[in-house]
Image (spheres, grey):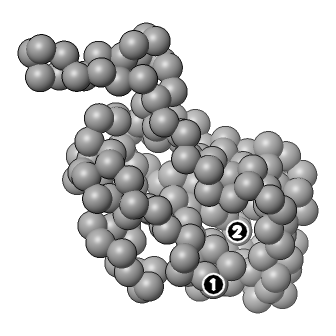
Amino acid sequence: MSVKTAQGGYAFAGGQDTVDFCLPLVQTTLVLTNALQADGFINADASYQWKVDLRPFRQVKLTGYIKTASASANSPKLQLRYYTATSTTPGNFVQLGASSVEISMFTGTVFADSGWIDLKEAARIDNCFLGLMNIGGDGAADPAINNVYAYFK
């Protein structure tokens, strides 16, 4: 948990490596029928976005369980991106971290983890809208995912 200090900065109650915020993104098995090749919201559903306050956080990681891997040769992955407002246009959402916050859906049945990635300074705002995106499908393969979470510290 982060706490505001008298000097105006943030201190970590459990130490700097403590996770401060866990955001559940997908909590039951979701089959991505004919997963998109083009950039788009997961399951072609723009409701997969969340409004959060990222001001106190410096890092993010994305994790999830790949129940059924994609057979697509297009490097299918889930990506967590951000925008400054809600939008149904996937292209408005941009890279959340210093590198892409993503997990592969091509690695077999596995628990996937992006590792900790520094947040872009521009994303560290109140009213930050996070969008969960799916890219690299082939329009035919049907990967299945579960227990997808975003962690912030």
**Number of residues whose C-alpha sits closer than 10 Å to that of mark 2, classed few (under 14), some (14–19) or many (20 or more):** many
Q: Which amino acid lies under the numbered mark 1 shown in the image of this protein?
A: Ala
In this view of the protein, which residue sits in the foreground, 19 or 80?
19
- What residue is rendered at 90% in x and 62% in y? 68
Label 1 vs label 2: CA separation?
14 Å
Q: Which amino acid lies under the numbered mark 2 shown in the image of this protein?
A: Pro
The answer to which of marks 1 and 2 sits earlier in the sequence is 1
In this view of the protein, which residue sits in the foreground, 136 or 41?
41
- What residue is rendered at 41% in x and 36% in y? 59
- What residue is rendered at 46% in x and 62% in y? 50
The image shows residue 98, relative to residue 78, as above or below, that is: above
Task: Find residue 19 and name its label.
Answer: none
The image shows residue 46, relative to residue 57, as above or below, that is: below
The image shows residue 61, relative to residue 80, as above or below, that is: above
Q: Residue furthest left?
A: 7
Q: Which residue in the protein does label 1 denote?
A: 44
In the picture provided, is 7 more to the left or to the right than 74? left
Residue 88 figure quarter: bottom left
Q: Quadrant of the C terminus?
A: top left
For the question of whether residue 62 can be seen, the reply is yes
Query: Residue 16: x and y, percent?
Result: 41, 16
Query: Residue 56: x and y, percent?
Result: 29, 35
The image shows residue 72, relative to residue 127, as above or below, that is: below
Instruction: Name the element at disc 2.
Output: loop
In this view of the protein, which residue sits in the foreground, 74 or 14?
14
In the picture provided, is 65 more to the left or to the right than 51? right
Query: Residue 141: x and y, percent?
Result: 85, 80
**Number of residues whose C-alpha sits closer than 10 Å to that of mark 1, classed few (under 14), some (14–19) or many (20 or more):** some
Query: Residue 41: x and y, percent?
Result: 57, 77
Q: Which residue in the protein does label 2 denote?
A: 76
Instruction: Name the element at disc 1.
Output: helix
